[in-house]
Amino acid sequence: MPFEVCLFFFLVMTGYLITGSLLRERDRGDSGGVTWRGKMMWIYQVRRGLRILAPYYAALAIAWLVRAPDMLGAWPWYAGHLSNIHMAFLDRWPSGTNHFWSLSMQQQFYLIWPLVIWWMPRGLIIPAVCVFAAVGPIARYFNDHMLAWCARPEVLTISCLDYFGVGALMAIAQWRGMLLTSRALRWVSITAFSVYVVMFTTHELGGPTFGMRFLQQSFLSVGLCGFIACGITGFGGRLGKCLKHPAMLRIGQLSYGIYLFHNLAPLLVGKVMPFLWNGAFENGVPAMLRIGVFAGATWAMALASWRWIEMPLQKLSAKMATRRDA
């Protein structure tokens, strides 16, 4: 399986979790019989900033300090959560900061999604989300045409809306009574993931995909919904025991920090141990040693972010929620 599956998993998960949270907040607000949207929008953005943006800007600060090449001249794009648009038009893939494209896209989603879920009439939410999800594969269908003026149209938000939209549709289905243990959900997900595997493998082997590759990631998104449902309800057997192991839980806890810092760690290590870049660590055991050093640095940075930024701010966010509910 391509490594991109892990990234798409988090994007689908984002659509599912954020939509579910917003729907529950809408039910709570509507039942109160008072005007609530403006106040909750402010609270939502503040809590989002505490949980997500503080570590994000810490990572940007490190990128600036280690002199990540693209950060020096394009920092406003990163600070303004528009780096995916910036990278779409670059003639090169920026070293050390290329992973920020997906984070910028997520921030754009966080910003606009409450407007859809909270302000859209209830009867129009499902049609609106379906249209939102359909835009992604439609945009990818025209990717080849967009290459004439855009080097990487696949990193534009418009090309990725189905990842968020499919996750959102699962949250809406659950909101309307679907159980995550639904056999229909499992079979639809298994079928969609199987189609994705066939399409991906056929393309990699040079076989025909009959012009349907623009739907490949949509099938993957639907397939990942089943995995998300199983993860929430719990896996059985050895897989379940493996996923519940303290080491796996710890990795999940630090996953945001790991993603934030995994490309920055080699740049930081290069400032401290520049000999790792002198050519003697390119192959064999030395190369494995260098990868181990980079992995250790990534883990240390993610752990520091969790202990001194994410965990304290999450506690503050929880206090805000408690005061709101009181």
Image: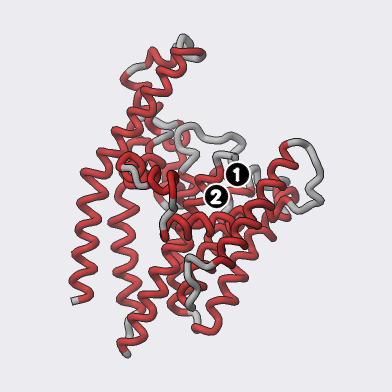
* Residue at image coords 27%, 42%: 305
Q: In the figure, residue 234 lies in which quadrant?
A: bottom left
Q: In this view, does 269 lie to the left or right of 187?
A: left
* Residue at image coords 59%, 67%: 184
Q: Can residue 271 be seen in this view?
A: yes
1 and 2 marks in contact (CB < 8 Å) = yes
* Residue at image coords 31%, 70%: 42
Q: Is residue 256 visible?
A: no
Q: What element carries label 1?
A: loop
Q: In this view, does 107 lie to the left or right of 132?
A: left
Classify 10 Å Cα crowding around label 1: few (below 14), some (14-19), many (20 and above). some
Q: In the figure, residue 221 lies in which quadrant?
A: bottom right
* Residue at image coords 30%, 87%: 32
Q: In the figure, residue 242 lies in which quadrant?
A: top left
Front in this rendered view, residue 169 or 99: 169
Q: Give the number of the disc on residue 39.
A: none
Q: Where is residue 282 in the image (x, y as percent from the top left)?
A: 50, 15
Residue at the disc numbered 1: 89
Rendered view: 313 above or below 133:
above
Classify 10 Å Cα crowding around label 2: few (below 14), some (14-19), many (20 and above). many
Rendered view: 326 above or below 269:
below
Rendered view: 140 above or below 147:
below
Q: Is mark 2 on a helix, strand or loop?
A: helix
Residue at the disc numbered 2: 85
User: Label 1 vs label 2: CA separation?
Assistant: 7 Å
Front in this rendered view, residue 132 or 252: 252
The kind of residue on which mark 1 rests is: Phe
Q: Position of residue 106 (x, y in %)?
A: 46, 55
The kind of residue on which mark 2 rests is: Ile
The C terminus lies in which quarter of the figure? bottom left
